[in-house]
């Protein structure tokens, strides 16, 4: 490829470019952060590849980024001597979006500029952000280790296509030249660029260099101006933020670093920065974000911690460093013990990594506990008081996965959980709160799962609990039933789903009530037998219950079985579910049930009873048309 080639952007890129230039307009300056971050990544990559091939340094071991501008040409250039791009890499990496989830991401854009700008920020527009300020971008690059004649020049106006051609380039690495739009000419200023660099890129561990400026007197002492000299100076701190001492880092710098590594424009809720010493030594800088990323539910992808070994970047998204249920945590782990050539496979087996993982998990749980404590602390600020609720609204459901994943921290996790209940509409009730309100004689923590909180709250299964004034925790997160199945008790009190097994209210039921129930079951036996026969294809058992007050019937799962509601959800998600029939429980005191015995429509009534119980918990009769027909027959 010597001749110029014109190629089209992948459709998504064209779409993204359009969005970038239109929605990120109010925060133009971030382009510099993105391009410097790319330059820094390219240097990290070179350092990493050079571990096995020192020749890649080509006698130029000092890695750096240079930012310069040309007032007359109206261009701004960001140049690095990192890994560089081969011709094919330039075509692939600058013409397509390789990231997984791009389609999903595009689908989530709403057209509302403000909301979209946030999303785009999270996704990381990277290189394309240059088009916010430039109407043309020229990239010249040569990959480390390849001959000078195999350089590449990539040019685009950011519309539908780009040009590539082969060039000769002695200098290793990449230079990105922005031809600034007329409304972005204020970036042709050393002062302005320096201030943006110190705001966003101070912590970049490489030196960022700019040309020094000097005051030049005007002729005849008539005014003067700043002129750039040929001398370069370093304009950032150039040391990795996490390697500095805590006391030298301001909250703003912590927040800025977070934004850089997370592509999140909102400040984090909390962070922990520690140098851990002992048999395994490492630095951890871990952040709890204020809101969930769009791909939080993708358990495969979203590990948020970067691994460094002695300041050398090793990998992004190192999932071995934290358990999956803490995948919302962002940050950096810098180990002093791991070998530089460590691979993902090695990480899985390393004892040092296990120690890091355990230590980091404890640290994150500690941060969450501190936030939770602040909720009720008298001396906490209003902002601190609200933090845990904010966290929980975003990540509570993910945290619950920990019950199934992290048995060592079960107790700490259980204390961090919050639920809505029959007395609280929002998830603010902890197990400890619940226990402190338990009725005299109550032996279990009762909960119910439903498709929505409203459905759970209105479930007929709660009737007797409501009548007796017993609080029941309401759960409507998809993970709830699965997660709770891993937690049998809290602080010595068993957990009991009210939708499973026969209700056992223990000593909450008085002797008279128990006796009445037993008698009812006895008297009712012939009807029950008839019901069982009529519904033998739908229900595994039919029994009299004391849990209903106003409703004639409800469905429950057998003890230890899956609730009908979870089974339905799994089916909807396309999963195989064993066909276990539910138990139909009937309220012997209900007029409809009483009428059954003498009714000449026994069969129809039995089926209606069953289908209504299904409807009441948000399900659909297996044969809705038959249901309607039966009801109509009775109505007429
Ligand atoms: P991201 O950096 O998030 O992957 P970008 O759009 O910023 O996305 O960049 C796309 C790709 O282009 C990068 O992954 C990298 O491979 C390549 N790239 C960008 N800038 C440089 C650079 N300065 N040096 C080498 N490669 C680069």
Image (tube, rainbow, N blue to C red):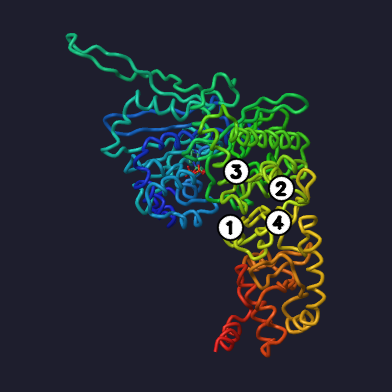
* Percent x, y of residue 366: 67, 33
Q: Which residue is mark 1?
A: 453
- Disc 4 to disc 2, C-alpha distance: 25 Å
Mark identifier at residue 438: 2
Quarter of the image for the C terminus: give it.
bottom right
* Percent x, y of residue 135: 32, 43
- Disc 1 to disc 3, C-alpha distance: 25 Å
* Disc on the earlier residue, 4 or 1: 1
Q: Which residue is mark 4?
A: 482
Residues at discs 2 and 3 in contact (Cβ within 8 Å) = no
* Percent x, y of residue 101: 53, 54
Q: Residue furthest top?
A: 221
Q: Is residue 91 left or right of residue 280?
A: left
* Disc on the earlier residue, 1 or 2: 2
Residues at discs 1 and 3 in contact (Cβ within 8 Å) = no
Disc 3 under 8 Å from ligand 1? The reply is no
**Residue in the foreground of this view, choosing between 326 and 593:** 593
């Amino acid at each position: 490829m010597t001749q110029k080639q014109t190629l089209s952007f992948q459709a998504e890129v064209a779409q993204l470019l359009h969005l970038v230039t239109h929605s990120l307009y109010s925060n133009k300056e971030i382009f510099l952060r993105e391009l410097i971050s790319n330059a820094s990544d390219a240097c990290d990559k070179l350092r990493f590849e050079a571990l096995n091939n020192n020749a890649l340094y080509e006698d130029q071991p000092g890695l750096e980024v240079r930012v310069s501008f040309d007032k007359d040409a109206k261009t701004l250039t960001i140049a690095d001597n990192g890994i560089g791009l081969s011709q094919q890499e330039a075509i692939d990496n600058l013409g397509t979006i390789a990231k997984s989830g791009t389609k999903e991401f595009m689908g989530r854009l709403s057209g509302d500029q403000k909301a979209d700008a946030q999303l785009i920020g999270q996704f990381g527009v990277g290189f394309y952000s240059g088009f916010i300020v430039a109407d043309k971008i020229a990239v010249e690059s040569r990959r480390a280790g390849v001959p000078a004649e195999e350089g590449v020049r990539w040019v685009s106006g950011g519309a539908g296509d780009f040009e590539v051609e082969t060039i000769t380039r002695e200098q290793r690495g990449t230079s990105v030249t922005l031809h600034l739009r007329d409304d972005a000419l204020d970036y042709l200023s050393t002062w302005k660029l320096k201030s943006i660099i110190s705001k966003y890129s101070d912590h970049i561990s490489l030196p960022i260099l700019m040309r020094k400026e000097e005051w030049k007197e005007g002729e005849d002492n008539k005014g003067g101006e700043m002129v750039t000299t040929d001398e370069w100076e370093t304009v950032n701190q150039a040391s990795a933020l996490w390697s500095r001492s805590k006391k030298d880092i301001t909250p703003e710098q912590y927040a800025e670093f977070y934004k850089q590594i997370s592509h999140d424009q909102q400040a984090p809720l909390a962070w922990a920065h520690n140098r851990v010493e002992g048999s395994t030594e490492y630095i951890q800088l871990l952040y709890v974000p204020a809101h969930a990323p769009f791909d939080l539910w993708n358990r495969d992808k979203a590990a948020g911690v970067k691994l460094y070994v002695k300041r050398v970047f090793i990998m992004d998204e190192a999932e071995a460093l934290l358990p999956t249920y803490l995948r919302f945590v962002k940050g950096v782990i810098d180990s002093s013990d791991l070998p530089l050539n460590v691979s993902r496979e090695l990480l899985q087996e390393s004892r040092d990594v296990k120690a890091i993982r355990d230590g980091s998990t404890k640290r994150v749980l500690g941060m969450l506990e501190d936030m939770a404590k602040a909720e009720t602390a008298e001396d906490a600020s209003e902002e601190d008081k609200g933090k845990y609720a904010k966290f929980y609204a975003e990540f509570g459901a993910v945290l619950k996965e920990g019950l199934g994943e992290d048995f060592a921290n079960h107790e700490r996790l259980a204390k961090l959980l919050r639920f809505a209940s029959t007395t609280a509409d929002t998830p603010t009730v902890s197990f400890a709160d619940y226990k402190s309100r338990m009725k005299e004689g109550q032996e279990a923590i009762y909960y119910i799962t439903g498709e929505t909180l409203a459905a759970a709250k209105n479930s007929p299964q709660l009737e007797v609990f409501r009548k007796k004034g017993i609080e029941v925790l309401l759960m409507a997160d998809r993970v709830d039933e699965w997660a709770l199945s891993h937690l049998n008790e809290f602080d010595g009190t068993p957990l009991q789903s009210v939708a499973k097994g026969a209700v056992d209210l223990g000593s909450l039921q008085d002797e008279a009530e128990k006796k009445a129930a037993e008698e009812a079951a006895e008297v009712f036996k012939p009807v029950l037998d008839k019901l069982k026969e009529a519904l033998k294809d739908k229900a595994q058992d039919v029994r009299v219950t004391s849990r209903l007050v106003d409703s004639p019937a409800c469905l429950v799962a057998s003890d230890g079985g899956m609730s009908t509601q979870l089974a339905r959800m799994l089916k909807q998600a396309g999963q195989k579910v064993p066909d276990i029939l539910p138990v139909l429980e009937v309220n012997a005191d209900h007029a409809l049930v009483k009428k059954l015995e003498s009714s000449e429509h026994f069969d129809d009534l039995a089926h209606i009873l069953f289908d209504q119980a299904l409807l009441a918990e948000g399900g659909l009769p297996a044969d809705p048309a038959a249901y309607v027909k039966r009801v109509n027959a009775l109505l007429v």
